[in-house]
Image (cartoon, coloured by chain):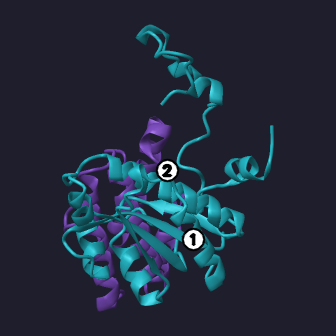
Amino acid sequence: MPTTLVLTEDEALELLAFLVTAARTQLDEAAEYGPLRLLTAASRLADTIAPRVSPETRALLAGPLRQVPETAVRTADPAGYASKLDAVCRAVARHLVTNLGREAGTP
Amino acid sequence: MTNPVLDAIRTRRMTRAMTEQPIERDRLEAVLEAARWAPNAGNRRLHRLIAVQDPRTLRLLRVVSPGMFQRPVAVVVICIDWGRAESFGMRRGLRGPYVDVGTLAQTMLLAAHSVGLGSGIVTSFSQAAVAQVLDVPDDVSPELIVCLGHAAPTQPAPMRARNPMTWQTLTDWERFPARRAVGYAEGRT
């Protein structure tokens, strides 16, 4: 996989600011907002890097992550929510295996 | 029953996606003037409003506000002036001023709707970071952000499916019902 830089310093700082402030706000919020904030961060990261990544990664960014509605929370549909997140995790893992490969000798 | 006020209350929606179109100053001022008429305990006026239109400041506020899905072209930050509250013998953290944050917010949301603006409220933000960005002093706390702008044609899906709440399921007459009768199946959350 090419080692192209896909974030500027400003963009990285914005993401950092989002993450640390989300950590703080989570102390006072409903627990179900935890995954919501992480997914918002992932979506913002995806939006930012999409124009600069490989076509394969761009396809990943446009995939299952976008299937989770922006404001979805667990309590509305616990099983469906977990299922959507599992789909995102599987897609990311598949992409990692394909693009980063496994240790030599791993089947 | 219907009239313009009830219609405005019924048709206002939380706007989570906004266009880049600027809003006219007179509309923003109309929203701010409405806030001045919001109900306020004891007419003590313990609140301060910070109106922001500068794009760079708006960008900073958004990155320290995880609950801000929209990209507003203006925001009004509702703050509690605890120094002024103390002059009335109120200690920091008393709940009264928080109630008035709500009345201010709702008044502004309805005013925005009445002048054709979309609006949304954000409470998920770092108070420390917002205070830093806006130079808010230690004895004043930013409590709620009202986002303003023009609603985008497509809005994110609501956070949950609308439940069948009506004013009847929301309301009990004369006293709180026995626990066994609390109607979760009727839409209580």
Instruction: Tell which of B127 and B96 is nearer to you.
Output: B96
Q: Which chain is purple?
A: A
Name the amino acid type tagged 1: Glu
Residue visible at 56% across and 63% down in the picture:
B108
Residue visible at 33% across and 67% down in the picture:
A96
Disc 2 or disc 1, which is closer to the eye? 1
Name the amino acid type tagged 2: Ala
Q: Which residue is mark 1?
A: B33
Percent across and percent down for residue A14 are 33, 80
Q: Where B58 sits versus A59, above or below?
A: below
Position of residue B89 in the picture relative to residue B34 (left or right): left
Callout count = 2
Instruction: Report if residue A107 is visible in the image.
Output: no
Q: Give the distance between the C-alpha atoms of the residues marked 2 and 1, in whole angstroms.
A: 35 Å
Instruction: Tell which of A55 and B122 is nearer to you.
Output: B122
Mark 2 belongs to chain: A
Q: Which chain is cyan?
A: B
Percent across and percent down for residue B172 are 55, 20
